[in-house]
Amino acid sequence: MFKRHKKLASVLFVSLFLLIALAACGDDEASGGGLQDSYVVASDSSFVPFEFYEDGEYVGFDIDLINAVADEAGFEIELETTNFDGIIPGLQTGSFDIAIAGISIREDRKESVDFSDPYYESGLSIGVHIDNEDINDIDDLEGKTIATRLGSTSSDYIEENIDGAEANQYEQLDQAYMAVENGSVDAILYDAPNVAYYIQTQGQDSLKMVGDLYQAENYGIAISKGQEELVEAINDALATLRENGTYDEIYEKWFGEAPE
């Protein structure tokens, strides 16, 4: 009888030990301990030259950069496209782990997601019809109808800084540029590199840039909250890519010259 009780006690002890060990592992996973093998990365599909479809392939500065970051950090990525205004909510609900889509680092967004170190310095530019001689700077936009992108910093800028202006917000940027070209809006106010790229390619005969660079801002890679080790790994990878020249190569590929 004593041996049977001793054997039962041993079994109970081992079982208790295994339960404690499993609970500890679960706590480690819940607290974000260690990097995963792969992450879901959200991006946009029409923000040239950062991310867009060309000849059936998903390409752009952001796409090359996030692939280089993943290779350097040692994890795989699964790219998914969504409308820009769905990116932050998707990170909050856990649909995505990471997002790269020309996302400006803002204090209000930091309440919902974490950001990497900045990887691109941008700002806002004005685009108007090539025959428009009435709009030459930001003051001339007062009382005008201005195209921009749904959920973007430029839509907030219009509302907060341009008296009497109406922001027409579009889910797809092509729609915004077409609105300027066909005269249904007076101008577009959006991220400078995108406005410049569109005018240099599709809109060179129909649009022009006017005014200065407004509201300088930095783009960052957005990460869902509570993944501190992932944020650190991405920042380390970005620093390495800058040091070894990979960042400059990607930049020159998409913007025609190395960054200053």
Image: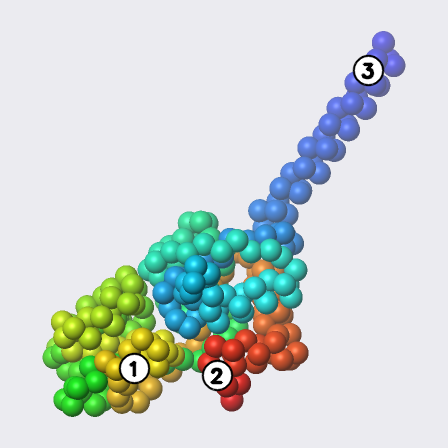
Which numbered tag is attached to residue 32?
none
Residue 256's tag is 2
CA gap, disc 1 and disc 3:
87 Å
Q: In the rendered structure, which amino acid carries the disc numbered 3?
A: His
State the image coordinates of residue 34 (x, y, percent, origin top left).
65, 54
The residues tagged by marks 3 and 2 sit, at their Cα atoms, a distance apart of 79 Å
Residue lying at the far front in this picture: please name it: 55
- Work out whether mark 1 precedes mark 3 in sequence or the reverse, and give the earlier one: 3
Residue 46 lies in quadrant: bottom left
Q: Could you say whether the residue bearing mark 1 is in a helix, strand or loop? A: loop
Going by the numbered disc 1, the residue's amino acid type is Gln
Q: Earlier in the sequence, mark 2 or mark 1?
A: 1
Q: Residue at x 47, y 66 (%)?
A: 59
Identify the element where label 3 is drawn. helix
Does 53 sit above or below residue 204?
above
Query: Is 126 placed above or below 234 here?
Result: below
Q: Which residue is mark 3?
A: 5
The numbered mark at residue 204 is 1
Query: In the structure shown, which secondary structural element does the residue marked by tag 2 occupy?
Result: loop
Measured as percent of width and height from the top left, residue 151 is found at 30, 64
Query: Could you tell me the amino acid type at mark 2?
Result: Gly
Residue at 26% across / 82% down in the picture? 205
State which mark lies toward you, 3 or 2. Answer: 2
Q: Nearer the viewer, residue 223 or 6?
A: 223
Residue density around tag 1, few if under 14, some if 14–19, many if 20 or more, within 10 Å: few
